[in-house]
Image (tube, rainbow, N blue to C red):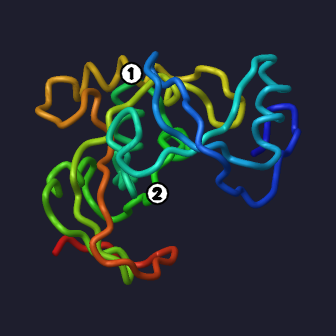
Amino acid sequence: MRFPDGTLAAGRPTIGDPIEAIFFGEPRPARAVDGPWSDALAAWSGKDLRLVAMGRGEGPDRGPTTTLLSTAALTELAAAGGAAAPLDRRRFRMTFGVDGVAPYAEDGWLGRDVRIGGAVVRVAGNVGRCAVTTHDPDTGRPSFDTLHVLNHSRGHLAASEPLPFGVWAEVVTPGAVALADPVEVT
């Protein structure tokens, strides 16, 4: 974890003891993540923060196992908001960026299986976006009004979550995946 001032918290995370964490004002079961991250987050923010892990199905929203986004959508969304260059893909924390398909092609994959390299995933829903996506991934400062642009350009769509941008999927068949592996809807 690298902070804007260059501070680095690194190591191999391990999942610690069960704790009760508050997400969106509600208590949720979670586990502490042992390592230097909580102390680094607290020092950087000046607040008592802890990094926690939530098990599958315990999250406050969809609890995805993997996420996909067509990289052409980054250009499309940027243009809709008046930006000349594509948005930085890190802003959206997607597991897989899919090249070579039309913008938002992944919206049509709901309920379908997708082969990614040696793995197969089943697309289960849209990824709704939050305010974190408005922040530049390098500076942590707001730099693009993602939520306003998504609401204006995609807020009218029927989706499993509001402000859809990308999709989430469950792993059907585990397998090795490498950069530039083919992605195909099966």
The dot on residue 175 is none
Residue positioned 24% across, 32% down in the render? 161
Residue 121's spot in the image, x, y percent? 28, 68
Q: Position of residue 168 (x, y in %)?
A: 31, 51
Q: Residues within 10 Å of mark 2 (few under 14, many from 20)?
A: few
Residue at 88% x, 39% y is 7
Q: Amino acid at mark 1?
A: Leu
The quadrant where residue 79 appears: top left
Return the x and y of residue 165 as percentages of the image width and height.
32, 39
Q: Amino acid at mark 2?
A: Thr
- Circle 2 sits on which residue? 95
Mark 2: secondary structure: loop
Residues 6 and 52: in front is: 52
Q: Is residue 147 above or below residue 29?
A: above
The residue labelled by disc 1 is 147
Where's residue 42, x and y in %?
79, 26
Q: Quadrant of residue 52?
A: top right
Cα–Cα gap, marks 2 and 1:
20 Å
Left or right: residue 158 compared with residue 66: left
Task: Provide the secondary structure element on which disc 1 rests.
Answer: helix
